[in-house]
Image (tube, grey):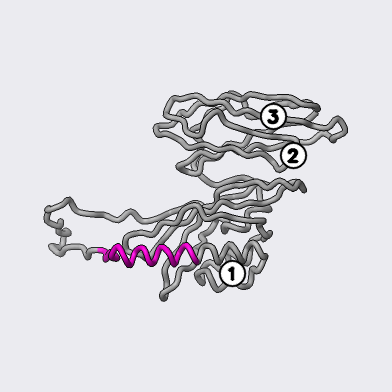
Amino acid sequence: MLPNFVALLYLVLACCLAGAAPQASSSGKQPPAKSQLSSAELNKRKEALASRVTEVYELAKAGQWRKMEALMTEDSKDIFYGQSKNPINDFEVKRVEVEPDGKTGRAVVDIKFAAGGFAQLTVLPQPSRWVFENGVWLLKLEKPVAHPLAAFTQGGAAGPPSALRFGQREIDIERGAHEYLLRFENTGQQTLAVRAGADPCQCMDVSLDKDKYAPGESGELRIKTAIDANMESREFRVQVVAEPGPQWTFLTLRLK
């Protein structure tokens, strides 16, 4: 199954122009300014968040779900209890960010997991939201979005629609050694960093002609297959991820 992904919502802090006077409210009172941490305090809190993210995903890797309960907010626990859970094979923390007030943060972790019974691991990015309460970072889950580790048993993916437009998303493939070329275009307004992966299978390899595509630029996804003549008919899935987002595109390859 393909993972769902936690949708990230975070506050954008308002700021005044340099040297400009703060604007008064309709009552004549100035709105209270949000406190911001010093650079040193913010770096310290960011390091603490990176450590906590690693701790949570280590527990997920070991399947120690009960120990994870202490590392999330109280209102997240019921959501966590109601989700199916499967251990992950490995992970890598790719990005950790903390808001200037130090009270909320975000993380993106590359999750590595096996699918379809094959040894090769699929790598997919997983965003998560965090809050700083009582001196510690806690994982924050929100309905109806699944928590970052439950989605390995569920289909689909949450996130913005992909700006990558493929000429076709479903193709028939044949047994033996073959190569398939799928063309796409970045129809969005910003440059996208793109990567692709396939269902874990030694019989398939996917690659892109480059890793970044400007608005209006076209690209090519190359799929090489080497499928044994005795393999039963089945479907393979190729996932294409574009950042910022993540923006997902799923391609289906059918072996007849």
Please give the label number shown on residue 224: 3
Comes first in the chain, label 3 or label 2:
2
Q: What residue do we see at 73% from left, 26% from top?
A: 172
Kindly state the secondary structure of the residue where label 2 is placed.
Answer: loop
In the image, the segment drawn in magenta is 34-51
Q: Is residue 99 left or right of residue 181?
A: left
Q: What amino acid is at disc 3? A: Lys
1, 122: nearer the viewer: 122
157, 24: nearer the viewer: 157
Q: CA distance from mark 3 to mark 1?
A: 40 Å
Q: What residue do we see at 58% from left, 46% from top?
A: 157
Comes first in the chain, label 3 or label 1:
1
Question: Furthest-bottom residue in view?
Answer: 134
Q: What residue do we see at 65% from left, 69% from top?
A: 64
Please state the horizontal and vertical placement of residue 159, each as a whole percent of the image: 51, 45
Please state the horizontal and vertical placement of residue 77, each as a whole percent of the image: 56, 69
Kindly state the secondary structure of the residue where label 3 is placed.
Answer: strand
Q: What amino acid is at disc 2? A: Gln
25, 166: nearer the viewer: 166
Q: Which residue is mark 1?
A: 68
Q: What amino acid is at disc 1? A: Met
Please give the label number shown on residue 202: 2
Q: Is residue 229 left or right of residue 70?
A: right
Q: Looking at the rendering, which quadrant does residue 248 occupy?
A: top right
Kindly state the secondary structure of the residue where label 1 is placed.
Answer: helix
Question: Furthest-right residue in view?
Answer: 230
Q: Residues within 10 Å of mark 1 (few under 14, many from 20)?
A: some
